Image (spheres, helix red, strand yellow):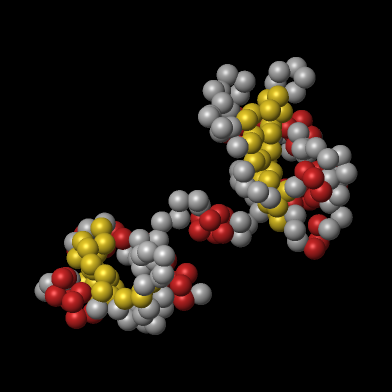
Amino acid sequence: MKTTAAIALLLATTAPAIAQDVTLYRGGPIVTMDGDVPQIVEAVVTRGDRIAFAGTEQAARQAAGQGAAVRDLGGATLLPGFIDAHSHFTVRAMSAGGLDLRDKAHAGVADIPALQAAIRDYAATVPAGRWIVVWQYDNENLAEKRHITRAELDAVAADRPIVVLHVSLHGAVANSAALAAANLDETTPIPPGGMMLRDAGGKLNGVLLE
């Protein structure tokens, strides 16, 4: 919890740090993750959007100079330069909403009709205009041993965007409204390393994979 709060603090104070130019962070364990063995320092100094110094607080104050803003961590842990290139930080926040198929209440979702029913029930609770997002979907757990399709999602709600995210987060199934909202159709170039599956008629079937 303290680590998360500290990361959020660093993100939230990026704009003020740039405006004030120099900011000194102190008052909690600062783990630089520099090298094979994590290093802990007393303070970090940023200049603009760059980390300028990491070390003792005394040396940090000298590096920061007079007039620097000081952020006291209050005992929280800070990871300076924490860059979430794989999106786990944002996905954790995003997954707080939507239909979670791992919830015990959905233990009976063992085939596509049951999945459709669960999505339909959840959609009734989502305000109009919002996307219907489903998490922790795994086609291998379905009796049919295949992906649900665009047409089957359209049968649930053709006029509302629905996206069913695979448990790996490296794939999804979208209905027609979601594909249209994302400007995806049969003429869309397939990104390198990606797949946009089609039905027997050559139409996108809604399955999007990395």
Position of 105 relative to 27 (above/below) = above
Is residue 147 at all visible to an observer of this figure?
Answer: yes
Q: Residue at 32% across / 64% down in the picture?
A: 13
Q: Residue at 50% across / 58% down in the picture?
A: 89
Q: Considering depth in this image, is 194 or 35 the residue closer to the camera?
A: 35
Is residue 115 at all visible to an observer of this figure?
Answer: no
The image quadrant of residue 32 is bottom left
Task: From the viewer's perspective, tell me whether residue 163 is left or right of residue 38.
Answer: right
Q: Residue at 71% across / 18% down in the picture?
A: 202
Quadrant in which the C terminus appears: top right
Task: From the viewer's perspective, tell me whether residue 78 is left or right of residue 121.
Answer: left
Position of 9 relative to 180 (above/below) = below
The spot of residue 203 in percent (x, y) is 70, 21
Q: In this view, which residue lies farthest toward the left?
A: 66
Q: Residue at 65% across / 49% down in the picture?
A: 168
Q: Considering depth in this image, is 102 or 39 the residue closer to the camera?
A: 39
The image quadrant of residue 83 is bottom left
Q: How many marks?
A: 0
The spot of residue 155 in percent (x, y) is 79, 35
Task: From the viewer's perspective, tell me whether residue 157 is left or right of residue 24.
Answer: right
Q: In this view, which residue lies farthest toward the front?
A: 36
Task: From the viewer's perspective, tell me whether residue 143 is left or right of residue 40.
Answer: right
